[in-house]
Amino acid sequence: MEELNPPGINQDFFRRVNKNKSDDDNLKLSLASDSLKNILAKEMKFKDLNDRLLKSRQEKVLVKEVVLESEIEFVNSLKQLKGIFKQELQTAINKVNDLYQSEVLKLEKIYKSEVIGNALLDIVKTISKAGWILLMKDSGVYCYKYFNPPFEVTEGYTDKAVKQYEEPVCSLKSIYVNLLHNHITYGSIMLSTEGQHVNCDHAALGSACAGSLEDRIIPLDNSEELLNLLNEIESTYKICHLDSAYYTPDIPFKIKKNESTWKLTGT
């Protein structure tokens, strides 16, 4: 009797068997996946989800990273906003400072008007038109005029003649008129000179002889009349009045026609 040999292993069979088994497993996995999707698609508690994840045998986890692509633009926007804020803040500060300075000037003007008085301010404004200023010096309040360059005094007047000196007798630097005096008297008018004026008791700085200006009222209540007096005083000491002088100049001179109408009362 012929021995029957078992048939050889059919590889195709195993492939078919495994294939079928694999298909069944894949089907089961697919059904399970669909079921999980349905579950996850529903609202559930975090604890339930966490428990399900712990029980699962999944070893790989897909993590998606969200990148903020507009971060640079956000930082730049903040920098721009910061720059705009600083600019607007500085503009506001400058505006406040301007308003502050304006108010300070208004307050100073009101203060001067109330403390000094409008009349005195009117004097300052009026005499300044002719180059005179108001000066506080030592114990006096003076109307003061400064000559730049110093005025060269070259003419001498007498009752009989006008002398034109070949060289300046002195140079007049400035004139002081003391407003605290009600009337012009000795010490009311002071001259600052280079050399000595013939009608001044000292060189450099001294009291001028008043001459025919003696006892003239110094009108503080009328700024225009005060200015006229100051201009007359200036004209008076731009020349030498020789009939009543502190000294006689020894400088060569020429005789001119007598035009003098001013006389000294004495020294």
Image (cartoon, rainbow, N blue to C red):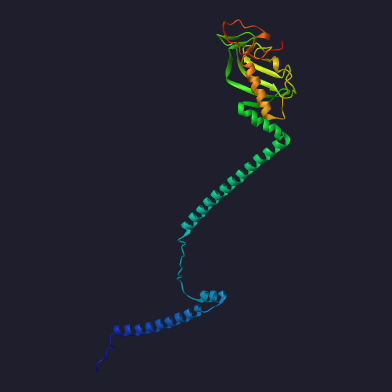
In the rendered image, the vertical position of residue 173 relative to residue 13, given as above or below = above
Q: Is residue 210 visible?
A: no
The picture places residue 1, in percent across and down from the top left corner, at 24, 94
Name of the residue lying farthest toward the right: 182
- Tell me the residue at 64%/16% (across/down): 237
Say left or right for 12 vs 170.
Answer: left
The picture places residue 89, in percent across and down from the top left corner, at 57, 49
- Tell me the residue at 74%/21% (across/down): 183
Image quadrant containing the C terminus: top right
- Foreground residue among 94 and 61: 94
Name of the residue lying farthest toward the left: 2
Q: Quadrant of residue 17?
A: bottom left
Say left or right for 107 vs 46.
Answer: right
In the rendered image, the vertical position of residue 16 relative to residue 184, given as above or below = below
In the rendered image, the vertical position of residue 92 relative to residue 214, given as above or below = below
- Tell me the residue at 60%/43% (across/down): 98
Name of the residue lying farthest toward the bottom: 1
The picture places residue 112, in percent across and down from the top left corner, at 70, 36
Say left or right for 28 vs 160.
Answer: left
The picture places residue 60, in percent across and down from the top left corner, at 45, 71
- Foreground residue among 18 and 238: 238
- Count of numbered marks: 0
- Foreground residue among 200 and 255: 255
Say left or right for 108 vs 55.
Answer: right
Q: Is residue 122 visible?
A: yes
